[in-house]
Amino acid sequence: MVEVVSVPGLREFKQRGEKIACLTCYDASFARVLEEAGVDALLVGDSLGVVIQGQATTVPVRLPEMVYHTRCVRRAAVRALVIADLPFATYSEPKRALRSAARLVQAGGAQMVKLEGGRERVEVIQALVREGIPVCGHLGLLPQSIHRLGRYRVQGREPKDAQRLLEDACLLEQAGVELLVLECVPVELAAAITAEVGIPTLGIGAGPNCDGQVLVLYDLLGLTAKPPRFAQDFLSGKGSVRQAVADYVAAVKEGRFPSEQHAYR
Ligand code: KIV
């Protein structure tokens, strides 16, 4: 029998020390292959703005586009948990966030929504959780804030920034977040956050000590012109996409990916 990955089941991964293997996914064909290769969670990321639409950032992505791609993925997903990104400026206050998240869940079939930000998102998260919508947080590098940040770079290197991120992680957990993405943060900070919170963390450019990993599928397939340092081309030298993804899943589960070369200090 297929063991379906559920939202409550995410904590069980952490409790039994099994790493969660997550990949971004934007369509039904890849969803089927990723599932067959053992991926636990499919993130319909707003990175689709860059890798599918050819935009320079994730900022232009619209809610109907996210709903469409989520629906495509959800049709093929049987075992894996489907998480969908709330796009830029669609969750600035609780009422708006509820309307946006409801579209992703009802029309798209998402089982969890992801949003970027720390303490300033607590009210929004509480409103979604009250409505029964599971939430994944996202701390560290926040791609939707790229115009404020100026460039994509590691976050939390200064002790005061690291402390703030650690506090944010605890506040998000208290607000009801069930899963937490940590993007581009130093290895030690990701390890400290992972040890502090009871919910699982998913690292991307956050070193090997998170409770799981997430990668942009097109980075894993070697399709990105300038891949980030934390990515690895798993397709190179392999016979098929299915084999490349299976190797990624095995490398995550066995703690072989990410390694030192993918980490920031
Ligand atoms: O949109 C996305 O692909 C993401 C991952 C980078 C975590 O948010």
Image (cartoon, rainbow, N blue to C red):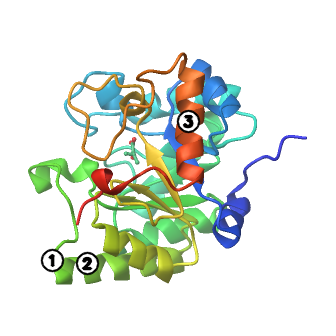
Callout 1, which amino acid? Answer: Glu
- Which numbered disc flags the more N-terminal residue, 2 or 3? 2
Q: Nearer the viewer, residue 22 or 56?
A: 22
**Is residue 66 depicted above or below 139 in this figure?**
above
- The numbered dot on residue 135 is none
Disc 3 versus disc 1: nearer the observer: 3
Q: Looking at mark 3, is its residue's CB closer than 8 Å to ligand 1?
A: no
43 vs 154: above or below: above
Would residue 172 appear left or right of 163 to someone viewing this image? right
Q: Quadrant of residue 6?
A: bottom right
Mark 3 crowdedness (10 Å alpha carbons): few <14, some 14-19, many ≥20: some
**Residue at which label 2 appears:** 162
Q: Distance between the residues labelled 2 and 3?
A: 33 Å
Mark found first going from the N terminus, 3 or 1: 1
The residue that appears at 62% across and 40% down in the rendered structure is 39
| Residue tagged 1 | 158
Image marks 2 and 1: residues in contact by CB distance under 8 Å: yes
- On the picture, is 20 further left or further right than 167? right
Mark drawn on residue 247: 3
